[in-house]
C-alpha cells in the first residue's frame, strides 16, 4: 500500500510541493523556498524530540517526617469556622477566637487528625508590632487612598498563621526545538524589501531546581502568597510542635499530587525562558521534552501575618511575610482623588498637544 508523504511549510504550516523549475520545495501560500536536504534535516530534527509530561515520584511520607510520633499530636486541636468552613490548627493554649479568612468567630473545636506531619518549618522572625508598623508604611505615598481611611479604619484582628506549602526540588534534562526567524530589511529605488530567514533552533541542557513553592491552601489566594515571596529557604528547620505555640496553622486542602501541575508550570516556564533563542528576531516553540530526575517533594509550614481591617463596612485583608516583612494587600480607592488625578493627566496631555499645534501653525 502506497503512502502519501506531505511536508509542512516551516514558515506558515501550509503543504509544500516540489517545483520542477526551481528544483526546490516551494510553499504555494507564502512562496517560501526550501532546499530538499535542509527540509529533510528539519523534519529529522523535529522527530528526535518526543514531547513528554513532567512526572514526579510524589511525596513519600515515609522518607521524611510524614508520620507523627507517639504523643506528638496530643494537645493539638482543629478549629472550624461555621461561617466560611475554614480550618486552623493550634495547640491547646492558643486563644483562637477569630477566623483568619473571614474574621468571624471560631467556635467549633475537635481533636486534631487527618494531616501529615510537616517536614520543615520557617519560624516567625517578625512579631505583631512589626506587622502593625508595616501596615502604616504600606499606607504611605498611596495618593488614591481615601484620606479618611487611616483615620476611620481600625485593625480588627492580627493573626500569625503558618501556611502549608509543598516544596518541589529536582534536576531536569531538556531538549527543545524552536521555529525562529531572522529578519533583514533593505530597499532600492523602487521598493522596500523584508527578507525572512527561517531556522530550526535546537536547545538542550540540564538545570537544577530547588524549593519551588506551591501553596497547599485553597483559602489563601495564590496571587497574594506569591506577592510576598521569596521566603529564605536556607533557614528551614526540622518541624517541632513547639513552633505552633502562640500561632495557628492552616490545615492543607491541596495535597502534593494536586500541587504538581503548578510546580510543573513554574519549571516549564523557567526552562523555556532560559533556553529561548533570543538572538533571533522572533521564535515559537515547536516541541519540547523536559524530563525530571532526582525529584523530591517536602511539606513545610511558612510564616504569614494576616491583618484584617474594616472601612465603611468592607473588610480589607493584608498579608505580611513573617520572615522578611514583605507586605501586600488591596486598598480602597477614592473616586474623587482618582477623578482629579486623571483629569490632571489629560489636562497636561492636552496642553502639550496645544503647544505642538501652535508651533506647527
Image (cartoon, grey):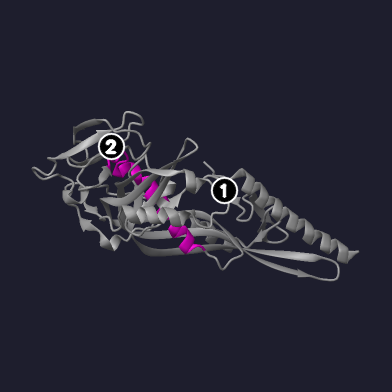
Q: Quadrant of residue 122?
A: bottom left
SS at mark 1 in the image: loop
Q: Position of residue 282 (x, y in %)?
A: 60, 61
Going from N to C along the chain, the mark reached first, 2 or 1, is 1
In the rendered image, the vertical position of residue 288 relative to residue 334, given as above or below:
below
- Residue 90 is covered by the magenta coloring: no
Closest to the camera, between mark 2 and mark 1, is 2
Image position of 116 (left or right of 312): left
- Dot 1, crowdedness within 10 Å: few (<14), some or many (≥20)? few
Which residue is identified by label 2?
Answer: 97
Image position of 285 (left or right of 343): left
Which residue is identified by label 1?
Answer: 5
Q: Residue at x 53, y 59 (%)?
A: 178
In the rendered image, the vertical position of residue 361 relative to residue 10, given as above or below:
below
The secondary structure making up most of the magenta span is helix
Which segment is the magenta one?
250-276
Residue 269 seen from this side:
no
Q: Position of residue 42 (x, y in %)?
A: 54, 60
| 2 and 1 marks in contact (CB < 8 Å) | no
Amino acid at each position: 500500500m502506497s503512502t502519501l508523504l506531505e511536508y509542512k511549510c516551516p514558515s506558515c504550516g501550509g503543504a509544500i510541493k516540489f517545483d520542477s523549475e526551481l528544483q526546490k520545495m516551494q510553499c504555494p501560500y507564502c512562496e517560501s523556498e526550501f532546499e530538499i536536504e535542509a527540509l529533510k534535516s528539519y523534519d529529522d530534527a523535529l522527530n528526535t524530540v518526543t514531547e513528554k509530561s513532567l512526572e514526579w515520584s510524589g511525596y513519600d511520607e515515609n522518607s521524611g517526617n510524614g508520620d507523627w510520633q507517639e504523643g506528638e499530636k496530643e494537645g493539638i486541636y482543629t478549629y472550624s469556622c461555621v461561617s466560611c468552613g475554614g480550618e486552623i490548627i493550634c495547640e491547646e493554649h492558643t486563644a483562637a477566637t477569630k477566623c483568619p479568612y473571614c474574621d468571624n468567630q471560631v467556635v467549633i473545636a475537635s481533636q486534631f487528625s487527618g494531616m501529615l506531619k510537616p517536614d520543615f518549618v520557617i519560624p516567625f522572625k517578625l512579631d505583631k508590632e512589626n506587622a502593625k508598623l508595616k501596615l502604616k508604611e504600606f499606607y504611605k505615598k498611596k495618593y488614591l487612598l481615601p484620606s479618611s481611611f487611616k483615620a476611620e479604619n481600625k485593625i480588627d484582628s492580627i493573626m500569625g498563621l503558618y501556611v502549608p506549602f509543598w516544596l518541589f526540588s529536582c534536576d531536569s534534562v531538556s531538549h527543545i526545538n524552536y521555529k525562529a526567524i531572522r529578519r533583514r530589511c533593505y530597499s532600492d529605488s523602487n521598493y522596500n524589501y523584508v527578507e525572512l530567514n527561517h531556522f530550526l533552533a535546537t536547545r538542550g541542557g540540564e538545570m537544577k531546581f530547588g524549593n519551588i513553592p506551591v501553596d497547599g491552601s485553597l483559602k489563601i489566594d495564590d496571587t497574594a502568597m506569591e506577592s510576598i515571596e521569596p521566603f529564605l529557604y536556607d533557614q528551614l528547620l526540622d518541624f517541632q510542635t513547639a513552633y505552633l505555640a502562640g500561632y495557628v496553622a492552616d490545615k492543607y486542602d491541596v495535597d502534593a499530587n494536586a500541587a504538581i501541575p503548578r510546580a510543573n508550570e513554574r519549571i516549564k516556564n523557567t526552562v523555556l525562558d532560559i533556553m529561548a533563542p533570543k538572538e533571533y528576531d522572533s521564535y515559537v516553540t515547536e516541541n519540547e521534552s523536559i524530563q525530571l530526575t532526582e525529584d523530591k517533594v517536602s511539606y513545610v509550614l511558612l510564616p504569614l501575618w494576616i491583618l484584617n481591617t474594616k472601612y465603611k463596612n468592607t473588610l480589607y485583608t493584608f498579608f505580611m511575610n513573617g520572615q522578611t516583612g514583605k507586605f501586600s494587600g488591596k486598598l480602597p480607592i477614592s473616586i474623587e482623588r482618582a477623578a482629579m488625578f486623571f483629569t490632571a493627566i489629560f489636562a497636561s496631555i492636552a496642553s502639550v498637544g496645544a503647544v505642538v499645534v501652535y508651533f506647527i501653525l
